[in-house]
Image: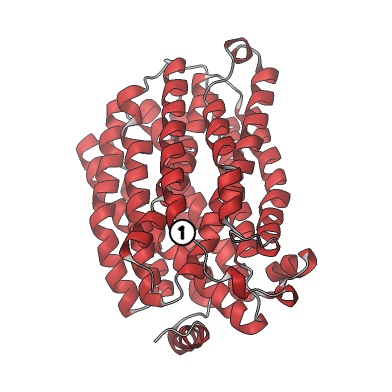
Amino acid sequence: MTSLTNKLTYSSASFSAALLLQFYQSKAQFFYVVELKLSPSYYALAIGIWAIYNSINDPLAGWIQDRKITRWGRRLPWMIAFWIPLVVSFGLIWAPPASFISNQSLLFIWLVIALLLFDTGYTVVVLAWAALFPELYSTSSERNIVSAFRQLFSLVALVVALIIPPMFISDGDIPSYAVFGWLLAGISFLNLGLSFFGCKETHFKEIKEEDKYSLKEGISIVFTNRNYQVFLIANLVTYFGYGQVLAFLPFFRKFVLFKDEGFETLAYAAAIGVTVFALFFWVKITNKKSPKFTFIWSAFAFSVMLVPLWFLTDPTMILVVMGGIGLGLAGLLMVVDLLISDVIDEDHLNTGKRREGIFFGFNGFFIRIAILLQAISLAIVSKITGFNENSDTQTTLGQTGIKFQMVILPIIAFIASIFLIRKYYDLDGEKLANIHEEIDKKNNVK
């Protein structure tokens, strides 16, 4: 059992992991397409190149980390080495040179290069940190507690990434994005440095040469492990679902509700405020039931609460609905770590190998596919509905396209994820209890 201080210190890295990715996911489309006037097609192409790079980068990084054992462990040395490149490259995303902004091709090239640099740092650092979770915490009770801590730090990050920006960033004020981006980079630099003290590895000395696996064996996981396949696809469409809500709220408030940036602060605050309290509710539910149960019902709650957004225009009622969305968001945030950890435990029992890195590597790749799908949907729906990034007003059809992407597509995604997990993911009930029992025995947990 690890101490409470170590649990909190380790969990604190969740702040930077969520801060950087959520700020990007919620603001990048709006920043590049609406503020910098990059065409949606160019933006989608940039994300496509990023996704192709991820198909190699994420799994390869996970495999290398699983195999490379140093005197300090398999994960921490990588985190320290890519710590500074990560935060610097994040700042560059929001600070394209002024001469590039007026040139679509140069702006596109800047976005691609900045994204690839950022993704390399993010993949190595966050993948290494995430892969430590099932290694450091083997019992379900510890995992539930640490997962809750991680999500609390993530929620603080959401406050910084979603609620605070409208207080400092204004529509049309391009330099304000760069200032805030570099501010987040500096905060993440300090936070990650502190979190390293809680990332001391414990199991790497037990790994022998014969426990290592080839890249071919690692890739085969995706094609042979059904529970992992189901998790990857369900997590992809779920991430796409709530990512759409985050990414299109700025479009929704500007072009449909005609509200200023302050309304974003209130909307995100309503959702996150409920999420904080609902998190403890879902922890109790998960302890009594299972991660599978929590995933299904939190996804259902999220999808149900999206329906009124299609019809409502009253700001007060929309804030109430955003609060309801926080109920589902809380469960989805906390349960993903538990689902993938159970998949990794099953693999460990079946193979005798510790392959956390490759599991989290492919998961990172699939998450980037979700962001690619967001960019593709923006390009396609914008073309069909006549969305004009150069105009402050949109046609009725253009407004409908925004609502379609913020409401209908996420609902479809959540329905698909519920079906997949409910029908095909079988780590539940007695089978899951037996896995936890065997893992406890293997780790000499009393």
In the image: residue 142, left or right of residue 231? left
Circle 1 residue: 414
User: Which residue does the image show at 35% across and 79% down from the upper left?
Assistant: 289
Q: Which percent across, then down, holds residue 115? A: 62, 35
In the image: residue 273, left or right of residue 42? left
User: Which quadrant is home to the C terminus?
Assistant: bottom left
Q: Is residue 331 visible?
A: no
SS type, badge 1: helix
User: Which residue does the image show at 45% across and 44% down from the upper left?
Assistant: 193
Label 1 neighbour load within 10 Å: few <14, some 14-19, many 20+: many
User: Which residue does the image show at 37% across and 20% down from the upper left?
Assistant: 170
Closer-to-camera residue (31/377): 31
User: Which residue does the image show at 63% across and 28% down from the upper left?
Assistant: 111
Closer-to-camera residue (306/334): 334
Q: Quadrant of residue 103?
A: top right
Q: Which percent across, then down, holds residue 374? A: 55, 42
Work out whether 394 lies above or below 250: above
Work out whether 233 lies above or below 81: below
Q: Which percent across, then down, holds residue 212? A: 72, 71
In the image: residue 277, left or right of residue 231? left
